[in-house]
Image: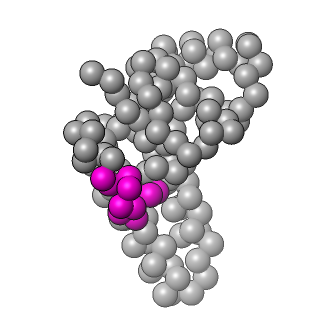
Amino acid sequence: MTIYVLDTDHLSLYGRNHPKIIENILAAKVPLTTTAINVEEQLRGRLAQVAEAKDGGTKSMAYRYLVNTVMLLSEFIVLQYDQKSDDIYQSLKTQRVRIGTQDLRIASIVLACDGVLLTRNLQDF
């Protein structure tokens, strides 16, 4: 069975109940899957919002978004950045593939599990 992996942009759309994303995921009847790198990106963004919030209302909202993101991520199978992923990552770096480090790590994980990445980031992938 093919593994479909949601990139950060698709995670965000899924979290906002984007109708087309929800429809496609339900129609495919596949497990919700993402990578450890995508989890890191999501949490870094939410933690930055918490850190930047100055007043009580903004801070409260930032914490709510953080908790909602953690709950959302708990629905997913998270593919790890393991030795096989790192070997692929190092090979891609040696080939001078010109995309960002995080995107290269995401690609490495997806390649390691022979998956398909679902993303709108066509420039880097």
Residue 4: horizontal and vertical position, in percent? 37, 33
Going 56% across and 87% down the picture, which residue do you hit? 55
Residue 92: horizontal and vertical position, in percent? 67, 17
Q: From this view, report whether residue 25 is shown above or below residue 100.
A: below
Quadrant of the rendered structure where residue 72 is?
bottom left
Q: Main secondary structure of the magenta part?
A: helix
Residue 112: horizontal and vertical position, in percent? 46, 17
Judging from the image, the colouring scheme is one colour
Going 39% across and 73% down the picture, which residue do you hit? 64
Q: Is residue 25 magenta?
A: no
Decide which of 87, 27 is in the foreground and name it.
Answer: 27
Q: Quadrant of the N terminus?
A: top left
Going 43% across and 69% down the picture, which residue do you hit? 65
Horizontal relation, residue 51 to residue 18: left or right = right
Q: Which residues are magenta?
A: 12-23
Decide which of 40, 104 is in the foreground and name it.
Answer: 104
Labels in figure, total: 0
Asked whether the viewer can see residue 36, the reply is no
Quadrant of the rendered structure where residue 35 is?
top left
